[in-house]
Amino acid sequence: MDYFIIVATTVAGLYFHGWLYMRIKRWMDRDLALSLAGQDEQKKTYMLQQLARSREQGIKRRDLPHWLQAAATGYADAKAPDVRESSPPLADGN
């Protein structure tokens, strides 16, 4: 019975450490993507989508910062060309 308790707690501890390690890696990757986005909410959404895309494509973790940097610089190209910034109203109200 003593061996069972030792094995069970060891396996549970190893599982928890593995889970925690994976969570911290994901948090670091998410933080990197959000830091490249700055304060722009639309760019934050875009960068999180690019992070998900990098996972789908199987980008290695060592290449991820460069890949996300390239995605951040390509953000202006990814915007829809017909979306325009609204201009302030004219002085005569038109």
Image (cartoon, rainbow, N blue to C red):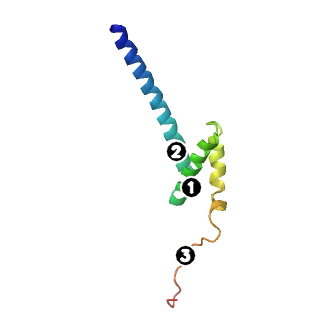
Q: Which residue is mark 3?
A: 86
Q: Which residue is mark 2?
A: 30
Please report whichever mark, 1 or 3, sits nearer to the chain's N-terminal start: 1
**Residue drawn at the location 63% of the way across and 58% of the way down:** 75
Quarter of the image for residue 11 reads top left
* Left/right of residue 77 with respect to residue 88 in the rendered view: right
Dot 2 lies on which element? helix
Which tag, 1 or 2, sits closer to the chain's start? 2
Q: Which residue is mark 1?
A: 46
Residue visible at 67% across and 61% down? Answer: 77
What amino acid type is highlighted by mark number 2? Arg
Question: Which residue is at the front of the view, 68 or 52?
Answer: 52
Q: Position of residue 45 (x, y in %)?
A: 53, 55
Distance of label 1 from label 3 (alpha carbons): 21 Å
Q: Mark 2 packing: few (<14 Cα in 10 Å), some, or many (20+)?
A: some
User: Which structural element holds mark 3?
Assistant: loop
Amino acid tagged 1: Tyr
User: Residue type at mark 3?
Assistant: Ser
**Dot 1: within a 10 Å radius of its alpha carbon, few (fewer than 14), some, or many (20 or more) residues?**
many
> Could you give the CA–CA distance between mark 1 and mark 2, rounded to whole angstroms?
12 Å
